[in-house]
Each structure stands twice: as structure tokens, then as C-alpha cells.
């Protein structure tokens, strides 16, 4: 396979001014990934600061309620800052330090990656600037405050449609201009090589732990693993260690108001191959190759691109990708709150919704859902959704 | 020698950029005629894209306006065809890769040649990823102009210089277009490094918005690219089309005088 590619997907489609930085990052990361001291420092940090390992929790009442497969939840919501994003932010902050860069930047949609990056930057005394769409800053005001408290500068992005796609463009543009002293911490398995690989490697701790934990509890591997997919970092981190095993992998995208309405974020389900944010992958675009804005009630899935390795897993038939509507995700969200006493992130609720559809037919099977984050941040979205009576979709 | 390379002989070349379809395609055609008559040596037609990573706010906004007006690659190619034989300056299409890939690489290369385009510049398609598109263009005699960056290692500069056709577009700063950021600290050393690896004409671009900067840059290069300063006139002139053409001509003539004064 060509370097930086997953089959025909991936690559490095960026302005020439970024090529030097990407080559530097690739070389540095290659050596760090084989550097025992670096890996040791990272796992110590994930344990003592991040709160790993996160539990694999048997959802007993949910299992009983659905009456089929045994359902386990990988509790990434119990990480410091409330989601899996911290795994990658800490890893890349360490990389930035090794590169001698004193400043980091990030894009954020819902604010989870921004908060994780601001947290890692504070922990290492790095300057931090986060680009966030103006519209998202309104929807996720609490996360904006958290980032500021942590010492980050939050830059509102008004270009384009003022959401995650545009925040990512703006972060890339800013990086082009500051590349000599700044490291760009991309929040998902997207972007130009080596980002999709590096972010996957920092997130695979999810799958590695799950594997040990499920074997310890059940004496065998699970039959099915589900994870939500926006850019796809929690899913890729969860799937990767199981890719050679007889385990079904299912990625769940956001169908928003329904694929047929055009208001969705089902990039793999309804997109076509193209180039966005530096890599070739599936993409929501019109017939002229202009990128279309995605929609999901869940701000973390509201992205018109997807990591190139997911495109590869889809084409190779190794993973299956399905989608779940806003309404189905909200139902799953409410059910988990009541049955298990866990408020999941709306993103993770998409994976749960698909698990709930499948579990009743899978008696005797073991199913793992990646609960990628907690839902405190989603209170306003849920409230206004239920208030509008949109829960029929 | 290609038509683009020839455009750099004789005098310091003035390469101008306008976003196609901003404010509309008819006005773009009139602006191109005006650029040509006022002293431009090469004219770049910018293909609008929803996510232009290398562009600052001025060209971003122009692209949004053009897209709202329904500008597509097919229409920009038609515009280029309609200008054939009416202008002296060679036309170059500058656009991001996704709309070109969506159109189809071979189909685009055919259409580029048929529309009389002399060259194509794709700012987010480095040579490492562009072999198939750039090869398709080369087979049809359309120059694929590559970009060089001031922070590139010498090996990479040499590769860019070897693979570029027509001229080499040397980015003058670390940053995006049209931000008023200062040019790279040591342009002289940068241009000397590029000269050492290629015999192509060198055009400096990004951030050149005045006759003074144009003159400074042209003293080190074979030409300069002016984009955002021209694109920005659409905003300042509003719906006043005659004034837009007048201001376009005035700016190009003053840039021309700056370059001719070297």
C-alpha cells in the first residue's frame, strides 16, 4: 500500500507550505511510536491523569430489557474531560513537546476535542488556540467557558457555515501561517497523513483494553462491536485491535432527520469519494464537487467527511456502516439514562440505538458498545429537541 | 517553449487572478478583457470552492459569492472558451482538487485543452498526489504549474522545480492569500535557492497588493502574482460594474508601471 494510504484512501492533499511540517511530524512520530520511554510516559499519563483504564461495564438492566445479546459498554465517558478525546490530545501534546513546539492549535465542533486539547495544553504549559464555529460556540457555550478557564484562546470562525468543517479549514489556514512554532492537534482520524494513523494509534487503547477486559469477563472475544462515526476516532480506536479477529464491526453514522431529507451526516452511507481536509475519503458533496454541510442533532457527528481508514474498511467489507436518526438516538439516550443511570453523549447514543435494534435478535451473543462520552454537554440539545416535539423522526 | 513560459520573456510578468463568477460570469469576462488590455501577462481564473484551504478571507468571500451565483467548473471552462482569441495573455485555471476530481481527471484535461487553457494550478495537490492529473494535463500540452514554499527543504524544491511546467509559483510567505502579512524574511535567499534548482521563470505570489511590493518582489523574481487586491475590488465597488472595471484597469496599470520601473 502507498505510504499514508489505506487502499485508495488517505494521502496528503495540502498546500505546499504544509508539506515540510507533515514530513517532520511523520518522521518524529515514526521514531516516537518505537520509543519505549515515550510510550511509557504516555501510558503513565493516561493512567494517572486521564483515569485509564476505563471500565468495561456489563449493562445488566439494558440486557434484560432487550432480551437478547449481552451488552457491554466501554466507559470512555469516565475519562478525564468526559470523552475519549483526551487519549489523543495527551498523545499529541507529548508529540508537540518532543517536536519542541510551544504552542498547539485545534479545531472543535461540540467542544469536546477543544476542551481535551486545552486540558492537555494546560497540563504541559503549552499555549493553546482553539478554532470553533460561531454557531457551535452558541450551541456549546459551556465548553467555550471550560476552554477559557483552562487558559485557551477560543477563536470564533465565521467563514463558510460557521461549523466544524469551517473551524477545521480555519485551523489549517492558521497552521499554514504559524507552522514553524505550532503543532496542530487534529481531533479525529482525518486530515493529511500521518494524522489518521497517529490519531488511530492514540485511540487504540480503547480497543486494546476492551479486548483484555472482555476476555477476562467472558473468556472469549465479543461477537459484535458498535461505535459511532463522525470523523471516526473512537470507532477506529475500538475497531483496530480487532481487525484480524472474527468479530463484526459496525460503525454508526448520524442519519439526522433521515437520509432522504438531505439533513444528515451519513458520509459513508450517502456520500461519494472526494478530497476534504487533506485526505481522500468518502465525503458529502454536490454534483460539482462542492462540500455539503452535514446535519446531526449531535454536534460531534455533524461533519461532512470521515477518516480514510473507515472508507477503506467499508470498501474492503471489513466493517459495516449504518445510520441512526436523531429521534432514534434520543430514544436510546433516554433509555440508558433510566435503565442504567448513565447519561451518554448524544454521539454515543447513536451506537447504542443500533445496538438496541440488533440485540433482541442476538441471544447468546456478546455485544460491546463504545460509550465514547458523557452527555452532560447535551442537556440543552435534548431539552430543545424534546420541547419541539421532533421525536417522531 | 510553452506559451506560459513565453509570457515571462521581455519584461517582468504580471500574473493576475480573479475569481470566476464573482460577482457573475459576464462581469468576469469583462474583467479579463480589461486585465489583458491594462497590462497583465498571465490571467488566472479562480474556480470557486467551498473549502479553500490556502485562501484568506477576501478570496473565500469571493468564492462564496460565485458559488451562490451558480458558478461551476463547466461554466468556467465555457468562459475560458469564449475568451479564446480575444486576449493576448494566456489563461490559467486555478482551483482546488475536489471539483476537478469530481469532473473526472481525463475529462477535465480534455476540456482544459479544448477551452484553450494554457495552464492549471491546483494549490492542494502537491506533486506527490498529483501524478495522474498532472500527467493527463501534460499529455494534452496544458502546463501544470506547481507551487514552491519558502520552508521547503532543498531536495523538495528541486523536485518541485523539475516537475513544474510553464513557470514556478513561489509562495512568498508562510500563510494564506491576501492577509497583509509581511513577506518571508529572507526572500532573496529563498529565491536564490529556487534559482539554483530550476531554469523555469519564477513568479512570486501571496500578499502582493501594491506597486511597491510588486516592484520589490519582481526585482528578485521574473514576475509577480496579484490576486486578493483585485478580487477585493468586487467588495469595494459593490454593484457598480463600470466602476469595478475602471478600478481593475487602474490597479493593473499601476502595478504594470511599478514593474516596468525596475
Image: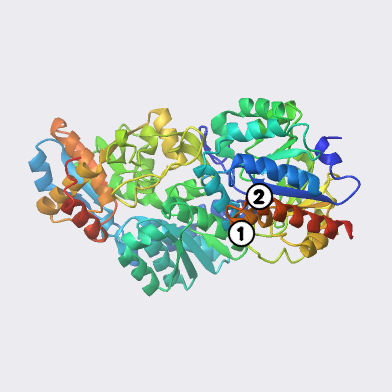
Give the chain of mark 1.
B
Residue at (66%, 47%) from the top-left corner? Answer: B18
Same subunit: marks 2 and 1: no
Q: Residue furthest right?
A: B10
Quadrant of the snapshot with the C terminus of chain A: top left
Question: How dense is the environment of label 1, judged by Cα within 10 Å: few (below 14), some, or many (20 and up)?
Answer: few
Residue A162 position by quadrant? bottom left
- The answer to whether residue B30 is visible is yes
**In the rendered image, which residue does mark 1 sit on?**
B236
Query: Mark 2 packing: few (<14 Cα in 10 Å), some, or many (20+)?
Result: many
Q: Is residue A193 left or right of residue B216?
A: left
Point out the frontmost of discs 2 and 1. 1
Q: Taking A200 as reference, is B244 left or right?
A: right
Viewer-side residue, A349 vs A391: A391
Q: Is residue A329 left or right of residue A113?
A: left
Q: CA distance from mark 2 to mark 1?
A: 31 Å
Q: Nearer the viewer, residue B28 or A335?
A: B28
Relative to A342, does residue B72 appear above or below in the rendering?
Answer: above
Residue A377: horizontal and vertical position, in percent?
A: 27, 60
Numbered label tally? 2
Q: Nearer the viewer, residue A197 or B41?
A: B41
- Can you give x and y, in whole percent of width and height, for residue A207 in the image? 33, 46
User: What residue is at 67 percent from the left and 51 percent from the top?
Assistant: B242
Query: Residue at label 2?
Result: A16
Corner quadrant of residue A235: top left
x, y percentage for residue A73? Answer: 22, 48
Chain under numbered label 2: A
Amino acid at each position: 500500500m502507498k505510504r499514508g494510504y489505506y487502499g485508495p484512501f488517505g494521502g496528503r492533499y495540502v498546500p505546499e507550505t504544509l508539506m515540510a511540517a507533515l514530513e517532520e511530524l511523520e518522521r518524529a512520530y515514526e521514531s516516537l511510536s518505537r520509543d519505549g520511554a515515550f510510550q511509557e510516559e504516555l501510558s503513565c499519563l493516561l493512567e494517572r491523569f486521564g483515569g485509564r483504564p476505563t471500565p468495561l461495564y456489563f449493562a445488566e438492566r439494558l440486557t434484560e430489557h432487550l432480551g437478547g445479546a449481552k451488552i457491554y459498554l466501554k466507559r470512555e465517558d469516565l475519562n478525564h474531560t468526559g470523552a475519549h478525546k483526551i487519549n489523543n490530545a495527551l498523545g499529541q501534546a507529548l508529540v508537540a513537546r518532543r517536536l519542541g513546539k510551544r504552542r498547539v492549535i485545534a479545531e472543535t465542533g461540540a467542544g469536546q476535542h477543544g476542551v481535551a486539547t486545552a486540558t492537555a495544553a494546560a497540563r504541559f504549559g503549552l499555549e493553546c488556540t482553539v478554532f470553533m464555529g460561531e454557531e457551535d460556540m452558541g450551541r456549546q457555550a459551556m465548553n467555550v467557558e471550560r476552554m477559557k478557564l483552562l487558559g485557551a484562546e477560543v477563536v470564533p470562525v465565521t467563514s463558510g457555515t460557521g461549523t466544524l468543517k469551517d473551524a477545521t479549514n480555519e485551523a489549517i489556514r492558521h497552521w499554514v501561517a504559524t507552522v514553524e512554532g505550532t503543532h496542530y492537534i487534529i481531533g479525529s482520524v482525518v486530515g493529511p497523513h500521518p494524522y489518521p494513523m497517529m490519531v488511530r494509534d492514540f485511540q487504540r487503547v480503547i480497543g486494546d483494553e476492551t479486548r483484555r477486559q472482555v476476555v477476562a469477563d467472558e473468556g472469549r472475544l465479543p461477537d459484535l462491536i458498535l461505535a459511532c462515526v463522525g470523523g471516526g476516532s473512537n470507532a477506529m480506536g475500538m475497531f483496530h485491535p480487532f481487525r484480524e479477529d472474527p468479530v463484526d464491526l459496525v460503525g454508526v453514522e448520524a442519519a439526522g432527520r433521515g437520509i432522504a431529507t438531505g439533513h444528515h451526516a451519513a458520509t459513508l452511507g450517502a456520500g461519494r469519494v472526494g478530497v476534504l481536509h487533506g485526505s481522500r475519503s468518502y465525503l458529502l458533496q454536490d454534483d460539482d464537487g462542492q462540500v455539503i454541510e452535514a446535519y446531526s442533532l449531535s454536534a460531534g457527528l455533524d461533519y461532512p467527511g470521515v477518516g480514510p481508514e473507515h472508507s477503506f474498511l467499508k470498501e474492503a467489507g471489513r466493517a459495516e456502516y449504518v445510520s441512526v436518526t436523531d429521534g432514534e438516538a434520543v430514544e436510546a439516550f433516554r433509555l440508558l439514562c433510566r435503565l442504567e443511570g448513565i447519561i451518554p453523549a448524544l454521539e454515543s447514543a447513536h451506537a447504542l440505538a443500533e445496538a438496541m435494534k440488533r440485540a433482541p435478535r442476538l441471544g447468546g451473543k456478546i455485544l460491546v458498545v463504545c460509550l465514547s462520552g458523557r452527555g452532560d454537554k447535551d442537556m440543552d440539545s435534548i431539552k430543545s429537541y424534546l420541547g419541539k416535539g421532533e421525536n417522531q423522526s | 517553449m510553452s506559451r506560459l513560459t513565453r509570457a515571462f520573456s521581455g519584461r517582468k510578468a504580471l500574473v493576475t487572478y480573479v475569481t470566476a463568477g464573482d460577482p457573475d460570469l459576464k462581469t468576469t469576462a469583462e474583467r479579463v478583457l480589461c486585465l489583458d488590455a491594462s497590462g497583465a501577462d498571465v490571467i488566472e481564473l479562480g474556480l470557486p470552492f467551498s473549502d479553500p484551504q490556502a485562501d484568506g478571507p477576501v478570496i473565500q468571500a469571493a468564492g462564496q459569492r460565485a458559488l451562490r451565483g451558480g458558478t461551476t467548473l463547466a461554466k468556467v471552462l465555457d468562459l475560458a472558451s469564449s475568451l479564446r482569441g480575444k486576449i493576448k495573455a494566456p489563461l490559467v485555471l486555478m482551483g482546488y482538487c475536489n471539483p476537478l476530481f469530481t469532473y473526472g481527471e481525463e475529462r477535465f484535461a480534455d476540456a482544459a485543452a479544448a477551452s484553450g487553457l494554457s495552464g492549471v494550478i491546483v494549490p492542494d495537490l502537491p506533486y506527490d498526489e498529483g501524478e495522474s492529473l498532472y500527467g493527463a494535463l501534460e499529455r494534452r500540452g496544458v502546463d501544470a504549474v506547481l507551487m514552491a514554499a519558502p520552508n521547503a527543504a532543498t531536495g523538495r524544491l528541486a523536485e518541485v522545480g523539475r516537475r513544474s511546467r510553464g513557470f514556478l509559483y513561489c509562495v512568498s510567505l508562510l500563510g494564506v492569500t491576501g492577509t497583509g502579512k509581511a513577506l518571508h524574511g529572507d526572500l532573496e535567499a529563498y529565491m536564490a535557492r529556487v534559482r539554483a534548482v530550476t531554469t523555469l521563470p519564477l513568479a512570486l505570489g501571496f500578499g502582493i497588493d501594491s506597486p511597491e511590493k510588486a516592484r520589490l518582489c519582481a526585482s528578485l523574481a521574473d514576475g509577480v502574482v496579484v490576486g486578493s487586491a483585485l478580487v477585493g475590488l468586487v467588495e469595494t465597488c459593490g454593484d457598480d460594474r463600470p466602476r469595478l472595471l475602471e478600478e481593475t484597469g487602474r490597479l493593473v496599470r499601476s502595478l504594470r508601471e511599478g514593474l516596468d520601473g525596475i
